[in-house]
Image (tube, grey):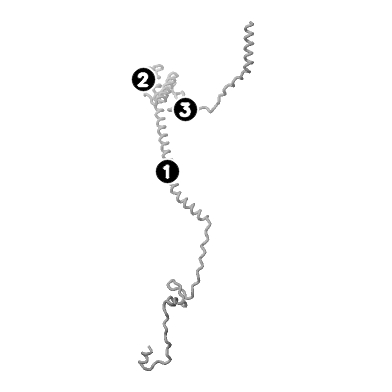
Amino acid sequence: MDEELNAAHEGQAGQIAAGPAAPPAPPERLVEGAPEKPAEPKGPPDRSAEYFSDIAHRNSRREAVKEYRRTLDEFRQTGAIQEKEWADFAHLTNPPDIQLHVFDAHQRAALDIEHWQDEQAEAEQESAREELRAQLLGEKARREEATRSPEIATQDSRAEISQSPVAPPPTPTPTAPLPQGGLLRGVPFNPHAPGRNARWEPAIPQLELAPVPERLPASEDQTEALL
């Protein structure tokens, strides 16, 4: 008894020396997200037992539903089914019409699978046509955009030119007034100005002419002497 008390005291002393115990961790909270959408089954949807309500006997109806679902599960797992013949259900004898109903259920499942495959093929073809149509429309839009881009650039440049300030016309340079006389073959001509030959006097000396006599000589000899 004393040893148990001493052990208890030693345990309490160890806890005091080590400090207060850490509080227990809170339980993990489970984050509830949106439930995952179950994957769609590969193949036609399953049918309820009401699909086989035309079968009167309960045992025959149960076996027919089982065979129908077994055929669908086989297709979902393997992607194909093994078609069965009438003799494959010969072991079913009770009630007498059970073999007929189970074989018919197998045929119904095979027909539903065939219809589902046709619908999938049609949907894939429609998707391919839509993709091709979208591609053609995109190419047509790009061609129209490429054709319209130069016109837009021309319109923008015209708008910029129309919005830019117009420079005033250059001021004409005043020209010297033409002298009296006008133009001669595009060159100013002044009849009163001295000619080129008379402008530089030392170049061409002036001829000194004798004054004309008041009376002309009477004879020809005197005329020759005058000349």
Residue type highlighted by circle 3: Ala
Q: CA distance from mark 2 to mark 1?
A: 58 Å
Q: Which residue, given by chain and number where applicable, does mark 1 sit on?
A: 139
Circle 2 SS class:
helix
Q: Which residue, given by chain and number where applicable, does mark 2 sit on?
A: 88
Circle 1 SS class:
helix
Residue type highlighted by circle 2: Asp
Q: CA distance from mark 2 to mark 3?
A: 33 Å
Q: Which residue is found at the position 41% from the left and 32% from the top?
A: 120
Neighbourhood count class around disc 3 (C-alpha, 10 Å): few under 14, some 14–19, many 20 upward: few
In the image, residue 163 above or below residue 176: above
Q: CA distance from mark 3 to mark 1?
A: 36 Å
Neighbourhood count class around disc 1 (C-alpha, 10 Å): few under 14, some 14–19, many 20 upward: few
Please identify the residue farthest to the top as the structure is shown.
1
Q: Assign the N terminus to one quadrant of the image.
A: top right
In the image, residue 141 above or below residue 62: below
In the image, residue 78 above or below residue 180: above
Residue 117 % position (x, y): 40, 30
Q: Do the numbered discs 3 and 1 sit on residues whose CB atoms are within 8 Å?
A: no
Circle 3 SS class:
loop
Near-viewer residue (172 or 39): 172
Nearest to N terminus: mark 2 or mark 1: 2
Residue 56 picture quarter: top left
Q: Which residue is found at the position 57% from the left and 22% from the top?
A: 28
Please identify the residue farthest to the front as the structure is shown.
202
Nearest to N terminus: mark 3 or mark 1: 3
Residue type highlighted by circle 1: Glu
Q: Which residue, given by chain and number where applicable, does mark 3 sit on?
A: 39
Q: Which circle marks residue 174 in the picture?
A: none
